[in-house]
């Protein structure tokens, strides 16, 4: 069992899926993976697919706001998912108001969504892990340029001598220029929006150095920025922004019976929310910022003996600094240490049985203090074990039975706000009054493959404890955020359902259908219905996704049940400048049922050569039927009423990429 000198260890299991079939998903009960062609085939508002769009089309996954990058997997919250780039977490991964992710498609090799039976190195989440792996620099020199509805891009890659390879990509968005053009063409059609400003872009670079035939080292960096300002005709304004800086240094050595991977990373994420608005005759200002800086180290050794036994052990160490709070106030900072040693054992008899057992141990310590005076406000430490099990029994050459079990713990929490699915939500650590979130889930099912057809059918049952619920999440921006720690409540959750995935591929035809029937509830939250159960955010009973592709043509259909809106019964408190106002709201445990979500997307892709250049053009239309898909309610301070909002109307999309 060997791998090429320049191939990362984590790509070993993906090779068959990526190289044998570019669109078909390599699947098991808890893991689904695809190559870059499967990602690009998804129709999206930016002209080509990305990993999140691909993951949202899979069973067990429901979306938040229609058209954005929010995911809710097997009953977990949006903040219970982990998004990683080459094994390193990315916090606040959405881009361009949630229309895409901050990872350029041109640098992606593959993506894998894990929902159960997790590996040892996966930790600090309780729902799912979307793993994005970047490609290795090509041995032939090339450069590229592209444009789509929202981005202009440029890139280059190639070798330097015999041992060094490089890769580079940069993108910038002309959103502000597009707004000005639209405003001139459609005067009076933009509501109360008087002006709009945007500063959006990202840059990625990677250098790979081959040390010997069995080892290499790579260094990569990713930086992104999103900043928006909305000026309204009534003199009010709102601004929002987030940014990421990620640096990764990796070493890989592939020995005869042992493989070694070592990663060191620097991760910085920040967000800001600002608002100026007149409410009940008073001018109100709010400015919130949230910061997370993390230094991490990961070491993993993989041992194997023939094709039967494999043993992995590793350690992940993180030191993080959290600083959420109101700008200009005495906001506390929290320093966190999280150490996770783990061991994983696997037994495999080809075409008969596969067994995997994982044991993780977590040591967590936090200390909160005021940066100005260094006054310690609180500290604590704890240990929590985790377990993951997976088994597969091949009953016949075409049918297999699979089962998974997981006990997971999460120490970083997301206080979801509005709009849901954007990276504006506060990321906070486990502190004295916020315990680690935990989940206990099991799943079982059958999978089969007959020639051009593959089918999997399975069910899951999941219990969740210490779920973080921010009491004022229904408000867009709120002075209640200034004391976020005091407004967080803990409760429990339950989710169960049935998941199916069918695929067909024959020559130029490819079809995929996924369906999920599920129910997710929350309970035991003191401020909500006296602890009684209620529907979780974006709990959708039915989720149906269908994709059909023929040559360069594609059609995607999404049909999802409407979800229930929740809030405290009868009345709801709105906070401005630490003053509380009572607003009318729907009464009852489940206050208002949002309508069914339906969307039909059409696309066409063509690749052709002009001289020495290769050109790829994507044309399409998102939401062909212009179906109005409201996804949430918001409180309008002018009318003092709750209103529905939708983000994605009918939208033609276009992308063009040329490579020399």
Image (cartoon, grey):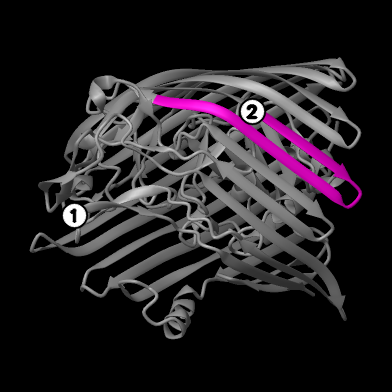
490 relative to 632, above or below:
above
Q: Mark 1 points at which residue?
A: 640
Q: For marks 1 and 2, give the CA distance.
A: 42 Å
Quarter of the image where one finds residue 227: bottom left
Q: Which of marks 1 and 2 is nearer the N terminus?
A: 2
Check disc 2: other Cα within 10 Å, few if <14, some if 14-19, many if 20+: many
Q: Which residue is painted at 41% across and 19% down in the image?
A: 383
Residue 174 position, x and y percent, is: 51, 76
Q: Mark 2 points at which residue?
A: 499
Quarter of the image with the C terminus is bottom right
Residue 119 in sight from this viewpoint: no
Quarter of the image where one finds residue 542: top right
174 relative to 517, above or below:
below
What is the span of residues highlighted in magenta in the rendered image?
499-521
Count of numbered circles in the view: 2
In the visual, does 47 lie left or right of 478?
right
Residue 476 position, x and y percent, is: 29, 52
Q: Which residue is painted at 71% across and 54% down in the image?
A: 555
User: Magenta residues: mostly which secondary structure?
Assistant: strand
In the visual, does 594 lie left or right of 503?
left
**The residue tagged with tag 1: helix, strand or loop?**
loop
């Amino acid at each position: 069992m060997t791998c090429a000198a320049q191939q990362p260890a984590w790509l070993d299991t993906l090779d068959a899926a990526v190289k044998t079939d570019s669109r078909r998903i390599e699947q098991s009960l808890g893991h689904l993976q695809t190559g870059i062609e499967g990602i690009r085939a998804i129709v999206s508002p930016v002209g080509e697919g990305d990993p999140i769009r691909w993951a949202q089309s899979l069973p067990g996954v429901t979306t938040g706001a229609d058209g954005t990058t929010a995911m809710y997997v097997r009953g977990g919250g949006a903040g219970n998912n982990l998004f990683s780039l080459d094994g390193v977490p990315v916090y606040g991964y959405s881009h361009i108001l949630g229309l895409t992710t901050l990872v350029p498609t041109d640098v992606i090799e593959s993506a894998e969504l894990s929902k159960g039976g997790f590996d040892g190195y996966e930790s600090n989440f309780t729902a799912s892990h979307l793993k994005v792996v970047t490609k290795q620099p090509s041995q032939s020199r090339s450069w590229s340029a592209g444009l789509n509805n929202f981005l202009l891009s440029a890139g280059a890659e190639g070798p330097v001598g015999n041992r060094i390879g490089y890769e580079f990509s940069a993108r910038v968005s002309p959103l502000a220029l597009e707004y000005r053009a639209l405003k001139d063409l459609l005067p009076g059609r933009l509501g109360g929006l008087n002006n709009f400003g945007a500063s959006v872009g990202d840059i990625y670079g990677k250098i790979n150095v081959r040390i010997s035939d069995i080892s290499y080292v790579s260094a990569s960096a990713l930086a992104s920025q999103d900043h928006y300002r909305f000026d309204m005709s009534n003199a009010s304004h709102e601004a929002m922004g987030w940014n990421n800086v990620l640096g990764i240094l990796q070493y890989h050595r592939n020995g005869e019976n042992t493989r070694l991977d070592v990663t060191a990373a620097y991760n910085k994420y920040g967000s800001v929310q600002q608002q100026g608005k007149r409410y009940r005759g008073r001018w109100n200002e709010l400015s919130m910022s949230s910061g997370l800086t993390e230094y991490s180290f990961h070491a993993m050794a993989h041992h194997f003996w023939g094709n039967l036994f494999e043993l992995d052990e590793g350690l992940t160490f993180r030191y993080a600094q959290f600083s959420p709070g109101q700008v200009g106030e005495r906001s506390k900072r929290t320093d966190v240490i999280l150490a996770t040693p783990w061991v994983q054992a696997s037994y495999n008899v080809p075409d008969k049985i596969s067994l995997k057992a994982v044991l993780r141990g977590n040591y967590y310590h936090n200390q909160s203090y005021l940066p100005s005076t260094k006054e310690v406000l609180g500290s604590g430490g704890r240990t929590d074990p985790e377990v993951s099990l997976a088994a597969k029994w091949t009953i016949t050459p075409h049918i297999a039975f699979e089962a998974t079990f997981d006990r997971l713990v999460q120490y970083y929490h997301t206080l979801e706000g509005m709009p849901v699915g954007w990276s504006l939500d506060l990321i906070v650590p486990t502190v004295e009054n916020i315990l680690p979130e935990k989940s206990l889930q099991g799943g079982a099912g059958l999978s089969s493959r007959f020639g051009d057809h593959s089918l999997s059918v399975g069910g899951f049952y999941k219990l969740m404890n210490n779920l973080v619920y921010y009491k004022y999440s229904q408000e867009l921006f709120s002075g209640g955020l200034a004391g976020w720690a005091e407004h967080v409540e803990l409760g429990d959750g339950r989710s169960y359902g049935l998941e199916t995935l069918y695929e067909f591929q024959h020559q130029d035809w490819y079809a995929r259908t996924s369906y999920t029937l599920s129910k997710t509830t929350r309970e035991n939250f003191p401020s909500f219905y006296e602890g009684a159960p209620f529907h979780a955010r974006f709990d959708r009973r039915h989720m149906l996704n269908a994709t059909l592709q023929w040559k360069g043509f594609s059609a995607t259909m999404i049909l999802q049940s409407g979800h229930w809106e929740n809030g405290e019964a009868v009345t709801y408190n709105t906070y401005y400048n630490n003053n509380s106002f009572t607003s009318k709201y729907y009464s009852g445990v489940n206050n208002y049922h949002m309508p069914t979500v339906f969307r039909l997307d059409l696309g066409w892709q063509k690749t052709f050569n002009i001289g020495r250049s290769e050109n790829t053009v994507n044309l399409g239309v998102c939401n062909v039927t212009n179906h109005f898909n409201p996804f949430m309610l918001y409180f309008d301070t002018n009318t003092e009423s709750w209103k529905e909002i939708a983000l994605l109307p009918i939208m033609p999309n276009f992308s063009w990429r040329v490579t020399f």
